[in-house]
Amino acid sequence: MDQSQAEIFTQILSERRSVRIFDESTPYDEDAVKRSLHAATLAPNSSNMQLWEFYRVKNPQIKAQLADYCMGQKAAKTARELILVVARRDLWRKRKDANLAQIRKVYKGRTDKAAKRAEAYYSSLIPKFYVKDYTGLFSLGKRIFAWSVGLFRPMLREVGDVNARISVHKSAGLAAMTLMYALKSEGLDSCPMEGFDSKRVKKLLKLPAGAEINMIIACGPGKPEGIYSERFRVPDEEVIFTID
Ligand SMILES: Cc1cc2nc3c(=O)[nH]c(=O)nc-3n(C[C@H](O)[C@H](O)[C@H](O)COP(=O)(O)O)c2cc1C
């Protein structure tokens, strides 16, 4: 019987577990990881700014060192690859320009409201949100502005420097999730990790100062004993609310 899309998705969803022990010898399709990483780039992301990067660490020496920096976690030590999902707020100018080029292509020659709005969004609003605020003064100004406008009409409140960081990490997290589901759909397992020494990892991989590691994902074919326990979630009633 053909599986419906919902059934396929449910199967991927239920089979994806955080696996802490990987099979270190079974051959696996390295191109499946490449395909999954491409799938990750299709994840939704704020303003389509795509402020992320993915680093596949396959080199055995660097991988071993990196696993040490992941606090020696078994998932990291036995993984066939370690994938860093990196938040790159600092690339905002480059991505803003890429988006501007794209909308100019899409709206070519148009001067209507929609074209002007799209142009203004990337050329004027986006810089105000992403520009790094070293003194905190610009952030304060933006928050006061948002608060004042908010007295009279609905207004975005999350406009400070910290909110730009959060926003970039939100999108990176969604890409990480997409990556893990894509890996599972390819028959590969994963374990997301935030237990690592970011300073040492950044130095090891020579990442620029502005890069922030969102997550390190261990991946490869998992071993059944790599799933440590039955899946546990609190009841839906505790976390899902309906406002009728
Ligand atoms: C942001 C994030 C960080 C995590 N960090 C670690 C980690 O450092 N080590 C680890 O073994 N698991 C880590 N996990 C995995 C969680 O423990 C796991 O997702 C949770 O227990 C639910 O189990 P499941 O993924 O099998 O459904 C992390 C998960 C997320 C989303």
Image (cartoon, helix red, strand yellow):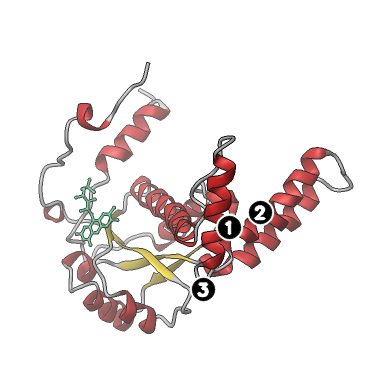
Q: Are discs 1 and 2 less than 8 Å apart at CB?
A: yes
Label 2 Cα neighbours within 10 Å, binned few <14 / some 14-19 / many ≥20: few
Q: CA distance from mark 2 to mark 3?
A: 19 Å
First of labels 1, 3 by sequence position: 1
Q: Which residue is mark 3?
A: 134
Q: Which residue is mark 1?
A: 129
* Residue 125 - label: 2
Label 1 Cα neighbours within 10 Å, binned few <14 / some 14-19 / many ≥20: some
**Residue type, label 1:** Phe
Asked if ligand 1 lies within 8 A of label 1, the reply is no
**Image location (x, y in percent) of residue 192:** 29, 58
| Residue at horizontal 23 percent and vertical 68 percent from the top | 76
**Residue type, label 2:** Leu
**Image location (x, y in percent) of residue 242:** 33, 22
Count of numbered tags: 3
Asked if ligand 1 lies within 8 A of label 3, the reply is no
First of labels 2, 3 by sequence position: 2
Name the element at disc 3. loop
Name the element at disc 2. helix
Quadrant containing ligand 1: bottom left
5 lies above or below 223:
above
| Residue at horizontal 15 percent and vertical 51 percent from the top | 227
Label 3 Cα neighbours within 10 Å, binned few <14 / some 14-19 / many ≥20: few
For the N terminus, the image quarter is top left
